[in-house]
């Protein structure tokens, strides 16, 4: 009945229909969520779901709103829906294993280098429990942290000594802070680069307490430019590998050998931040221009810094290789204590370095294996995957699969000029946009991260392990079965 002066309905009676927390906690979904997230987290989620409904009811009181005529059972259903959403969001904040179908081998957002089987086993054997991280079994006393990995680095690179820290940024920072705080560091203008947003050479220098002395020009710097810049207070010449970009054309720079000769004749250090750190020459599979650590050492660099999880294919770590006396000075500096690596790093790093020592790196180390795979093999795998997909889905003509030529990327700021030829699978599903397909792939039981290029959803099997192909097929089926 409609009465002109009827009092507008308030939220009050509706609030009585809100399900109480303890009733919601007895619903069948809750056990599964408790097992996933723990009871305390689930309780917080249940309360916040009910609170959010309550405040929507109150804020819309008198104005109808979505719950204007809701009874207890529909409010309960709404609360359960919100609880599931919140729980899923919370769970997805945690690390999720994903399939990298982007073709970017060293994908920083996806954790850079996937570890070798030997490195995974090493986590269980020496990384997880008690191990001789800093213990000498012969004397029964405190030993040197990381001695095993360091010895292996020395053998592989020919350096006198080595030191491992948390990442390459830490390695560069330690070198600068220990040897050039309060002094000048000479860097070519062509090497004052930014690597991945938060590592900018001038900022790192300033933070370490050193003063930057820029020499030369963006494209050309001569030996004489360095020579003229050396003053009483100069600590070192620093060469920075520009990593993620290249200046091509009219360029020149002195060689490492020339710089190290100049530095030693003037009593200063020559250090190189090599970044991606190839332990061997990778030019035969198309990765030109990547400094090889052993070559830098042979050419006389006093210290070279590089990452553990770029072209080395290991865990996140920063490695400093070079002259023993300098390495020991860093090891006993208090700053090292703040940057030192833990047992998970040493266990996996030793397993990776061991592959190099046995000359088995191309077989064992996923990053190197993926970089060296030929286009023809990727084409063969792509065709096989397409056949399996077609055989296993009832597509109704909804699913489009096409092989096209393209390029993979090294990633991780390594070899930016390199174009790795590959075969891509372009996937279309009904009238879904590439963005919609990508979003659904990311929500598959095993999430898949794909690439969109030229308005196509693309899958590059270069970065997908053969053992993941079944899950990739499942993910594409999931896309077809779960219209949003
Ligand atoms: C990648 C890179 C760094 C930073 O290395 P992280 O291991 O990510 O800390 C520093 N310098 C150069 C030249 C690099 O390429």
Image: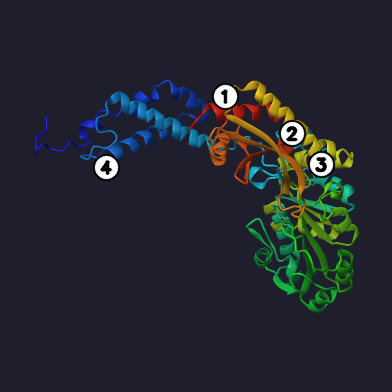
State how far apart marks 2 and 4 are (Cα): 53 Å
Q: Ligand 1 falls in which quarter?
A: bottom right
Local crowd size for mark 1, using a 10 Å CA cut-off: few (<14), some (14–19), many (≥20): few
Circle 1 is placed at which residue position?
396
Q: Is residue 474 above or below residue 283?
A: above
How is the protein colored in the picture?
A: rainbow
Horizontal and vertical percent position of residue 391: 66, 21
Quarter residue 142 falls in: top right
Q: Within 8 Å of ligand 1, the CB of disc 3?
A: no
Task: Sort mark 3 into few (<14), some (14-19) or many (20+) by Cα contacts within 10 Å.
Answer: some
* Residue shown at the point (35%, 38%) measured from the top left: 52
Q: Nearer the viewer, mark 2 or mark 3?
A: 3
Residue tagged by mark 4? 59
* Residue 140 image offset from top left, x and y in percent: 81, 39
Q: Which mark is residue 372?
A: 3
* 150 on left or right of 443: right
Identify the secondary structure beneath mark 3: helix
Give the mark nearer the N terminus: 2 vs 4.
4
For marks 1 and 4, give the CA distance: 47 Å
Above or below for 216 versus 13: below
Q: Are marks 2 and 1 in contact (CB under 8 Å)?
A: no
Q: Earlier in the sequence, mark 2 or mark 1?
A: 2
> Which residue is under mark 2?
120
Q: Foreground residue, 312 or 470?
A: 470
CA separation, marks 3 and 1?
38 Å
Question: Residue 40 location in percent, x, y?
Answer: 45, 32
Labels 1 & 4 near each other (Cβ < 8 A): no
Secondary structure category for the residue under label 2: helix
């Amino acid at each position: 009945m409609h009465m002109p002066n009827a009092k507008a309905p308030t939220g009050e009676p509706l609030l009585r229909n809100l399900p109480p927390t303890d009733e919601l906690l007895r619903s069948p979904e809750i056990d599964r969520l408790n097992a996933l997230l723990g009871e305390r987290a689930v309780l917080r989620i249940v309360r916040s779901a009910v609170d959010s409904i309550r405040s929507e009811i109150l804020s819309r009181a008198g104005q109808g709103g979505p719950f204007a005529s809701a009874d207890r059972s529909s409010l309960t259903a709404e609360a359960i829906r919100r609880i599931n959403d919140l729980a899923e969001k919370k769970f997805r904040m945690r690390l999720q294993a994903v399939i990298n179908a982007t073709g970017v081998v060293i994908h920083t957002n996806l954790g850079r280098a996937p570890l070798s089987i030997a490195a995974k086993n090493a986590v269980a054997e020496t990384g997880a429990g008690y191990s001789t991280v800093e213990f000498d079994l012969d004397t029964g006393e405190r030993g040197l942290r990381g001695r095993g990995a360091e010895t292996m680095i020395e053998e592989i690179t020919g350096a006198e000594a080595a030191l491992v820290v948390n990442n390459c940024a830490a390695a560069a920072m330690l070198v600068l802070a220990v040897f050039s705080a309060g002094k000048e560091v000479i860097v070519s203008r062509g090497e004052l680069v930014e690597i991945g947003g938060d590592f900018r050479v001038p900022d790192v220098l300033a933070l370490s307490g050193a003063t930057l002395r820029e020499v030369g020009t963006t494209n050309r710097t001569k030996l004489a430019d360095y020579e003229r810049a050396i003053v009483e207070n100069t600590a070192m010449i620093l060469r920075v590998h520009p990593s993620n970009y290249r200046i091509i054309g009219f360029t020149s720079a002195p060689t490492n050998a020339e710089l190290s000769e100049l530095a030693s004749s003037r009593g200063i250090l020559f250090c190189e931040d090599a970044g991606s750190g190839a332990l061997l020459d990778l030019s035969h599979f198309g990765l030109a221009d990547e400094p090889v650590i052993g070559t830098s050492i042979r050419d006389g660099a006093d210290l070279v810094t590089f990452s553990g999880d770029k072209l080395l294919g290991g865990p996140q770590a920063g490695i400093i290789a070079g002259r023993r006396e300098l390495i020991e000075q860093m090891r006993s500096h208090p700053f090292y204590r703040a940057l030192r690596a833990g047992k998970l790093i040493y266990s996996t790093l030793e397993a990776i370095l061991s592959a190099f020592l046995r000359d088995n790196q191309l077989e064992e180390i996923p990053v190197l294996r993926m970089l060296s795979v030929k286009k023809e093999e990727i084409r063969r795998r792509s065709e096989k995957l397409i056949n399996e997909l077609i055989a296993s889905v009832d597509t109704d003509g909804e699913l489009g699969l096409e092989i096209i030529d393209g390029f993979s990327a090294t990633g991780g700021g390594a070899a930016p000029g390199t174009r790795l030829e590959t075969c891509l699978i372009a996937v279309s599903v009904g009238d879904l946009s590439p963005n919609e397909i990508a979003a659904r792939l990311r929500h598959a039981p095993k999430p898949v991260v794909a690439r969109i290029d030229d308005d196509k959803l693309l899958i590059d099997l270069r970065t997908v392990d053969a053992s993941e192909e079944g899950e990739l097929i499942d993910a594409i089926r999931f896309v077809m079965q779960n219209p949003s």
